[in-house]
Image: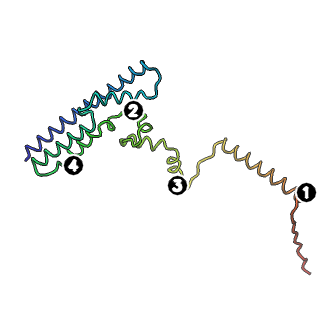
Amino acid sequence: MYGYKQQFNDKVTEFTAAVLKDVKDRREFIKAEEARIGMALGPVNEIEEIAEQIASEKFAGTLADRDYRKQQIDALIEDHFTGTGAMPDDTQIERLTDALLCEELTDSTPYKIANTEYPIMNERMFDERAAKNAAATAAVHEQERKMTGSRRQRSPYENALSDRKAKARNKERRKRYNDFISGKTPGVMTVKIAKEAE
């Protein structure tokens, strides 16, 4: 049984290497087609779709085609099951899953988060995205401030803005009060006079 597991491990290694090569070839072919179509047609919005369609036709039936790759993975797992009577171990299943998702895992495009509906991010990308999120960063700083009990110093701009707003509010309040006192606005003014104690 150990010999069969080693053979299966070797098959998976060869399979993943072939998948990486075919996917890389397909990706390079698509880039070349996009450049060729772009020069021939000029600015067209569907260049990527056209190049993708041409690549799908050219690479059909190879490991660069996801459906064919899935069939091959199923055949490998079935072969292992018939040979050993058990499913492959978790490591081998994970390697085959990585081979199935090869396009997403090896995509180095910096815009893949914006361009794909459900992007797959590694830990570094996830941390960078979280660091760029201003709301989350502000929440973390607010939590730290509350835990330490210290407040940040306002900038001179923030102080000047606060002063301008306060002066504007005070001016409006003073105007309303003076209008009320002089009788220019309707209202009731109650004055309580305390009796002097005898």
Residue type beneath disc 1? Lys
Q: Is residue 147 above or below residue 118?
A: below
What residue is drawn where x is 42% and y is 27%?
A: 47
Image coords of residue 50 (percent x, y): 38, 28
Q: What residue does disc 2 label? A: 109
Q: Which of the two labelled residues, at mark 3 and mark 4, occupies the earlier sequence position?
A: 4
Residue type beneath disc 4? Asp
Q: Secondary structure at mark 4?
A: helix
Spatial CA distance of label 4 from label 1 is 84 Å
Quadrant location of the C terminus in the rendered image = bottom right
Q: Is residue 62 above or below residue 42?
A: below
Residue type beneath disc 3? Thr
What residue is drawn where x is 17% and y is 48%?
A: 88
Q: Which mark is residue 184?
A: 1
Q: Which of the two labelled residues, at mark 1 and mark 2, occupies the earlier sequence position?
A: 2
Query: Dot 3: few (<14), some (14–19), or many (≥20) neighbours within 10 Å?
Result: few
Q: Which mark is residue 148?
A: 3
Whether tag 1 and tag 2 are in contact, CB under 8 A, the answer is no
Foreground residue among 148 and 114: 114
Q: Quadrant of residue 155?
A: top right
Q: Quadrant of residue 31?
A: top left
What residue is drawn where x is 87% and y is 66%?
A: 188
Q: Is residue 47 left or right of residue 146?
A: left
